[in-house]
Image: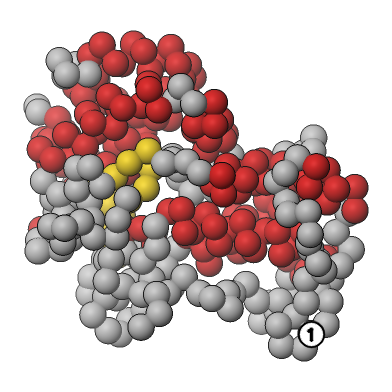
């Protein structure tokens, strides 16, 4: 079977998506393409054990999308980018163009990784992900001049200072050897920030209904759409706010500031409604020992992800 036939068979005919199975049948065919066969060896040497993760991330982010099921808007399901539901949609992309995007990204990667910051960024994504198949890929523009999103030249490797800071902070706070409270921060990231920052809300009205899709895979005209870099900026803002709670370990705060991961001037976080200092210990206790139906803290944004009208 062709690459396209293999991808369609595994994605469209299985309710329980299996990336390992997809990679086992489709990735060797991609590696064998004459245009990148030489690049494969270079990337294997550069990435080592992370090369397998790269293959999964390329397949996931280039060829697939996790669409909400219609009409009930209850769950999401993996679909190919050329799925019928995406006809006349800026997120649509033909198989041939998806393949061209993959080839373009793989060809550019060896040079991109020559930067020490880019190499660190890639490794931090692979070792400290909170979203499956996280990788430093993002859309350059919300819509191209052709009115499209998922298009060759618009999905690019990307890394900037804020993305690196976010990943370094994530690593520091979830690593048991460095974190003042790794269990707490792992829970914060997986239970709170992942859901509120990276996934859409459940919206059952309006033109673009959604429910727990990746924000960069929502329709670009939806108020819930956001590029990956925007989501990461919000993750960083929420985490540094927690580090500014009254009672956060002082030694850890200083260490993070000395490493240039946290701002040097970090005033104590205050409740935007009452003006009271927010307590690190109280927040920690509520998160790790929740009471059903009761929450004194809410994750939210004074300047939300949603675009302003």
Residue 91 position within the rendered picture, expressed as x and y whole percent measured from the top left = 21, 57
**As drawn, 257 above or below 42:** below
Q: Residue at x 62, y 72 (%)?
A: 299
Please give the count of numbered marks on the rendered protein: 1
Q: Residue at x 27, y 84 (%)?
A: 206
Give the camera-side residue of 236 and 127: 236
Seen from this angle, which residue lies furthest front?
A: 265
Give the labeled residue for mark 1: 275
Side of 16 where 174 appears, left or right: right
Q: Residue at x 57, y 74 (%)?
A: 301
**As drawn, 94 above or below 50:** below
Q: Neighbour class for label 1 at 10 Å: few (<14), some, many (≥20)?
A: few
Can residue 283 be seen by looking at this rendering? Answer: yes
Q: Residue at x 21, y 37 (%)?
A: 101
Give the camera-side residue of 20 and 100: 100
Can residue 77 be seen by looking at this rendering? Answer: no
Side of 100 where 197 appears, left or right: right
Q: Secondary structure at mark 1?
A: loop
Residue 234 position within the rendered picture, expressed as x and y whole percent measured from the top left = 55, 62
Give the camera-side residue of 113 and 51: 113
Colour scheme in the image?
secondary structure
């Amino acid at each position: 079977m062709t690459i396209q036939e293999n991808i369609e068979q595994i994605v469209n005919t299985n309710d329980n998506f299996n990336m390992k199975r997809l990679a086992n049948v489709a990735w060797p065919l991609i590696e064998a393409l004459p245009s990148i066969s030489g690049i494969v060896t270079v990337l294997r040497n550069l990435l080592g054990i992370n090369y397998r993760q790269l293959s999964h991330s390329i397949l996931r982010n280039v060829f697939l999308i996790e669409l909400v099921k219609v009409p009930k808007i209850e769950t999401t399901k993996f679909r190919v980018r050329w799925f019928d539901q995406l006809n006349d949609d800026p997120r649509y992309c033909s198989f041939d163009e998806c393949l061209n995007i993959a080839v373009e990204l793989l060809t550019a990667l060896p040079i991109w990784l020559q930067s020490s910051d880019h190499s660190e960024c890639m490794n931090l994504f692979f070792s400290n992900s909170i979203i499956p198949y996280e990788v430093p890929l993002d859309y350059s523009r919300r819509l191209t001049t052709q009115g499209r999103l998922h298009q060759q030249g618009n999905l690019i490797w990307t890394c900037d200072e804020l993305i690196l800071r976010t990943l370094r902070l994530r690593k520091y706070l979830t690593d048991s050897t460095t974190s003042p409270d790794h269990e707490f921060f792992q829970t914060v990231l997986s239970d709170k920030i992942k859901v509120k920052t990276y996934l859409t809300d459940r919206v059952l009205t309006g033109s673009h209904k959604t429910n727990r899709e990746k924000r960069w895979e929502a329709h670009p005209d939806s108020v819930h759409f956001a590029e990956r870099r925007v989501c990461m900026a919000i993750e960083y803002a929420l985490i540094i706010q927690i580090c500014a709670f009254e009672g956060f370990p002082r030694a850890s705060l200083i260490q993070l500031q000395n490493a240039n991961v946290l701002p040097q001037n970090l005033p104590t976080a205050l409740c935007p409604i009452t003006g009271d200092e927010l307590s690190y210990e109280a927040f920690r206790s509520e998160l790790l020992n929740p009471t059903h139906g009761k929450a004194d803290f809410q994750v939210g944004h004074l300047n939300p992800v949603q675009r302003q009208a």
